[in-house]
Image (tube, grey):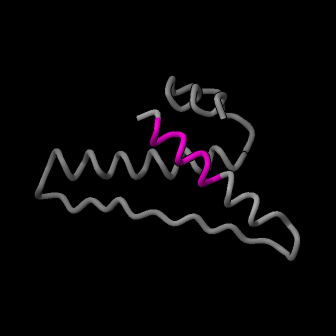
Amino acid sequence: MQTYWISAKQGLQKPLHPHVFQVANDVFCNIMCAMECSLDDKSISCQADQTVLVSGKSRAGKTVTTKYVMKYLAALLQRS
């Protein structure tokens, strides 16, 4: 988790390997950017709604992946 927090915070140019934490971080950033947009300019319609779809075959780890996404988002909310 920490690697992805640092990468997002510093805006590193080198992309990290695709990971569920990266997807969760992108969701969080989109929500925060939309909320800041709506606070800054009331005339612009900014939406903070996000959806994460976790799909796969039976026993592919969908429940565990969803837990990782929720854990990461909860940790980011505590940090901010």
Answer with the quarter of the image where residue 40 lies. top left
Does the stretch in magenta take in 56? Answer: no
Looking at the picture, tell me which residue is in the foreground, 76 or 22.
Answer: 76
Q: Main secondary structure of the magenta part?
A: helix
Looking at the picture, tell me which residue is in the foreground, 30 or 71.
Answer: 71
Q: Residue reaching furthest left? A: 43
Residue 59 in the image, given as x and y percentages of width and height: 88, 71
Residue at 64 percent across and 29 percent down: it is: 2
Residue 17 in the image, given as x and y percentages of width and height: 75, 39
Residue at 46 percent across and 33 percent down: it is: 79
Residue 11 in the image, given as x and y percentages of width and height: 51, 27
Image quarter hosting the C terminus: top left
Q: Which residues fall within the magenta stretch?
A: 69-78
Q: Residue reaching furthest bottom? A: 58
Image quarter hosting the N terminus: top right
Residue 50 in the image, given as x and y percentages of width and height: 46, 63
Looking at the picture, tell me which residue is in the foreground, 59 or 34.
Answer: 59
In the picture provided, is 17 more to the left or to the right than 15? right
